[in-house]
Image (cartoon, rainbow, N blue to C red):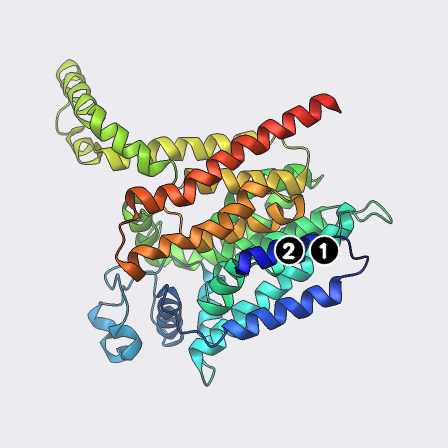
Amino acid sequence: MAFVGLAFAARRLEAVAQPRAVLLLGACLLRLLLLPLPVTLSDDALRYLWDGKVARAGQNPYALPPAAPELAPLHDATWRRLPHRDVPTVYPPLAITAFSIATLLPFPLLGWKILATAADLLACVFLLRLARRRGLPAGRAAWYAWNPLVALEVAGMGHVDALGVAAVVGAVLYLTPRPEDGRASPRKGALCAAAGVLAKLAPLALLPLWSRRSGRPLAFLGASLGLVAVAFLPVVTATGGIPPGLIRYGISWEFNGPLYEPLWRLLDVAGADRLLQAGLGRLERLTGIYYGLDFLYSYLYPRLIAKAILGAGMLAAVAASLRETDLVAGTGRLLGRLLLLSATVYPWYLLWVLPFAALERRVPWLLLGALIPLVYLPQMAGIPLMPWVFLLVWGPFWGSLAGFRTGFREGSRKG
């Protein structure tokens, strides 16, 4: 019902000449209603507060998982509710800083949700300004600002993605030339790009596209990556390389991946792991190298093979983004492709794509925003994700995407 209401309202707001005040007021009220919700759909916000508490206590959340004996004096009610207590944090330094600030507030969980909501509202402001620079109806921003999924996942569940999304929309805004003088603000864009990476790592994949479109690629990359490097240097030094939590996430985490789920099952049925193991055995016999290659056997299983294939696809998507000529469309397309190639797709991951889907009114992605909350059914009602819930979420999306592209091509030919 909420998404039907969004479609009804957004269509009418697009016809309003100056809907900015109404749109922002509606966004504030919608989020205000959801702020008191308990974090029952996700426990991420509890982990945020724990990581912030650890950092504020002078300990290292990148090296010490919650179960570490060194952190025993910090154990509290939040700690007892934490999942994955054996995994160190995966969140970048800006996010950890924000978590630490929240732990200083009288009501840390509510305080954190207010901070995340403020970032989300900033994204709405940026989106309105971006619509103006693009010459688009300001009412299109309602597809994001009034989106029930966005409000639920940020104001309701307090996901840190709001910080990264605001930074990404800000980067695109400042890299888009102003209509009055045709000038952009690449320095501000680089600052927002760095903030996005330091809030969550996903925007790292956008830096090649953004630097190419900035007009000064080396300066943009130098500024954004320089800020990221300065912030990450203490982390890398303390952990001796890539933080172990990130490695654990990349190898072990998986949920609702639209391509990953069918791919690894297909590889399993086809016996891809056994074929690769047999090939590795022949390579060892040919080269006489056994001990040096034996470690590879532990990586040859369907799930990890599927992740390797999709990882190569992600690299190809980043390379393909360098050909994009439209900054808004290119950013949205790349984020969408990365999401589809991911092994883990929680509902709040869609927030990264929705601002750009809103401006371009990409029906398949907006439809997915209405359907993806169905993946909460397994934990709420005990219904298995595979196959029916998975098909209910992704079937209409793929069908709509095929229809959307066919209609676009036909329209282009007529034009």
In front here: 271 or 138?
138
Residue 267 is left or right of residue 290, and the answer is: right
Identify the residue under disc 2: 8
Which label number is shown at residue 185? none
Looking at the rendered structure, the kind of residue marked 2 is: Phe
Residue 296 is left or right of residue 20, and the answer is: left
In front here: 75 or 64?
75
The residue at 19%/21% (across/down) is 275
Distance, label 2 to label 1, CA atoms, is: 7 Å
Residue 384 is left or right of residue 168, and the answer is: left
The picture quadrant where one finds residue 206 is: top right
The residue at 80%/60% (across/down) is 18
Q: Do callouts 2 and 1 mark residues in contact (Cβ within 8 Å)?
A: yes
Number of marks in the rendered image: 2
The residue at 66%/24% (across/down) is 410
Q: Is residue 223 visible?
A: no
Secondary element under disc 1, as helix, strand or loop, is helix
Q: Please tell me whether residue 99 is drawn above or below residue 13 in the rendered image.
A: below
Number of other residues with Cα within 10 Å of mark 1, as a class: few under 14, some 14 to 19, many 20 or more:
few
* Residue 354 screen position, x and y as percent: 56, 50
Identify the residue under disc 1: 12
Q: Please tell me whether residue 18 is drawn above or below residue 358 in the rendered image.
A: below
Secondary element under disc 2, as helix, strand or loop, is helix
* Residue 227 screen position, x and y as percent: 56, 54
The residue most toward the top is 286
Looking at the rendered structure, the kind of residue marked 1 is: Arg
The picture quadrant where one finds residue 307 is: top left
* Residue 219 screen position, x and y as percent: 66, 44
